[in-house]
Image: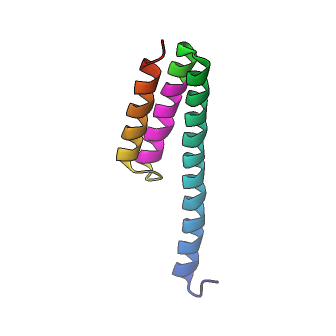
Amino acid sequence: MANTKSAQKRSRQSLKRASANKLAKSNVRSARKAVNIAISAGSKDDAEKSLRKLSSFADKAAKNGAIHKNSATRLKALYAQRVASIG
């Protein structure tokens, strides 16, 4: 347990931030799964919708520091390429 007031505050902040980061990463993972499912089903419309959602979640996570901005960009590029290859 934290001994000083400032250490108690830092502990509270840390828990709050960890929770927000966990939610952001979870949203990105769920969006990735949705895109993968749409791609494997061969549904280009659903894949594009899911890709837009993934892009949004990845950018938000990067903006808040939950993931690195280059990771978000890499994810978006990878999945955009996969969606574009759907026949």
- Does residue 77 show up magenta in the picture? no
Up the image or down, 47 lies above or below 22; here it is: above
Count of labels in the image:
0
Up the image or down, 16 lies above or below 41; here it is: below
Residue 52, position as x, y percentages in the image: 49, 26
Which residue does the image show at 40% across and 26% down from the upper left?
81
**Which residue ends up furthest to the bottom in the rendered image?**
3
Up the image or down, 29 lies above or below 47; here it is: below
Query: Is 81 on the left-hand or right-hand side of 53?
Result: left
According to the image, what is the colour scheme of the structure? rainbow
Up the image or down, 7 lies above or below 83; here it is: below
**Magenta-drawn stretch, dominant element (helix, strand or loop):** helix
Residue 39, position as x, y percentages in the image: 55, 23
Residue 66, position as x, y percentages in the image: 48, 52
Which residue does the image show at 57% across and 16% down from the upper left?
42
Nearer to the camera, 62 or 43: 43
Query: Is 81 on the left-hand or right-hand side of 31?
Result: left
Residue 76 sits in quarter: top left
The image quadrant where one finds the N terminus is bottom right
Query: Is 59 on the left-hand or right-hand side of 39?
Result: left
Residue 79, position as x, y percentages in the image: 45, 30
**Which residue ends up furthest to the right in the rendered image?**
1
Query: Is 52 on the left-hand or right-hand side of 27?
Result: left
Span colored in magenta: 50-62
- Does residue 58 show up magenta in the picture? yes
**Which residue ends up furthest to the top in the rendered image?**
87
Nearer to the camera, 55 or 40: 40
Which residue does the image show at 46% across and 32% down from the upper left?
55
Which residue does the image show at 60% across and 35% down from the upper left?
33
